Amino acid sequence: MRRLAICSLIATGLLSGCGGAPSTAPAATPGGTPPTAETAAPNAKSETVLPSKIEGSGDLKGLSATQIGAALGPPDFRRRDPPAEIWQYRASKCTLDLFIYEDAVTHADVRSPPGLPEKACLDEIIGRR
């Protein structure tokens, strides 16, 4: 009987890590409310948030999450795996993926059909905000 109880406790502990797919919900701030582009950067609109000329996704590398949020608004999809985040912006025919680590874009990638220039996708995403 004791052996069964120990095995049951071990199985419960192992299965507790199988909670399903990772959450895409924003993580709560210490105050208990999820952060948004507005709350993360209340004064960001007064800053120069994007380089004046963006030719490719690499031009976004090094920008802060605050700058991106202020310029593009909230992402269409956000996944948090602290200290990293993935932000995704979707356009009609393409997707911009931003990989943010410790509040800076470390990698940016545009996924689009063959023949659609990366710049056209970026222009659509930046222009709609």
Image (spheres, rainbow, N blue to C red):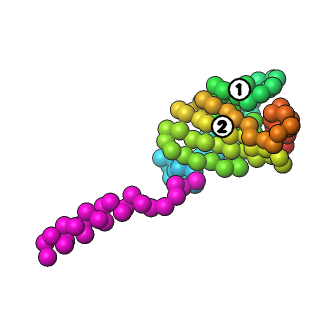
Is residue 99 toward the left or the right of residue 68 in the image? left
User: Which residue is label 1 attached to?
Assistant: 58
Is residue 18 toward the left or the right of residue 3 in the image? right
Q: Quadrant of residue 107?
A: top right
Residue 66 in picture, x, y percent from top left: 65, 34
**Residue type beneath disc 1:** Gly
Give yes or no for residue 3 being in the magenta stretch: yes
Image quarter hosting the N terminus = bottom left
Residue 71 in picture, x, y percent from top left: 75, 36
Residue 56 in picture, x, y percent from top left: 77, 27
**Residue type beneath disc 2:** Leu
Q: Secondary structure at mark 2?
A: strand
Q: Quadrant of residue 49?
A: top right
Which residue is at a point 42% across and 60% down the rendered structure image? 18
Residue 120 in picture, x, y percent from top left: 86, 35
* Residues under numbered marks 2 and 1 in contact, where contact means CB atoms less than 8 Å apart: no
Q: Is residue 90 above or below residue 63?
A: below
Tell me the CA gap for discs 2 and 1: 10 Å
**Which region of the structure is painted magenta?**
1-24
User: Which residue is label 2 attached to?
Assistant: 98
Image quarter hosting the C terminus = top right
Which residue is at a point 58% across and 53% down the rendered structure image? 24
Q: Is residue 129 above or below residue 43?
A: below
Give yes or no for residue 88 being in the magenta stretch: no
Tell which of 100 and 29 is nearer to you.
Answer: 100
Q: Is residue 27 above or below residue 105?
A: below
Which residue is at a point 86% across and 37% down the rendered structure image? 115
Whether residue 100 is visible, yes or no, is yes
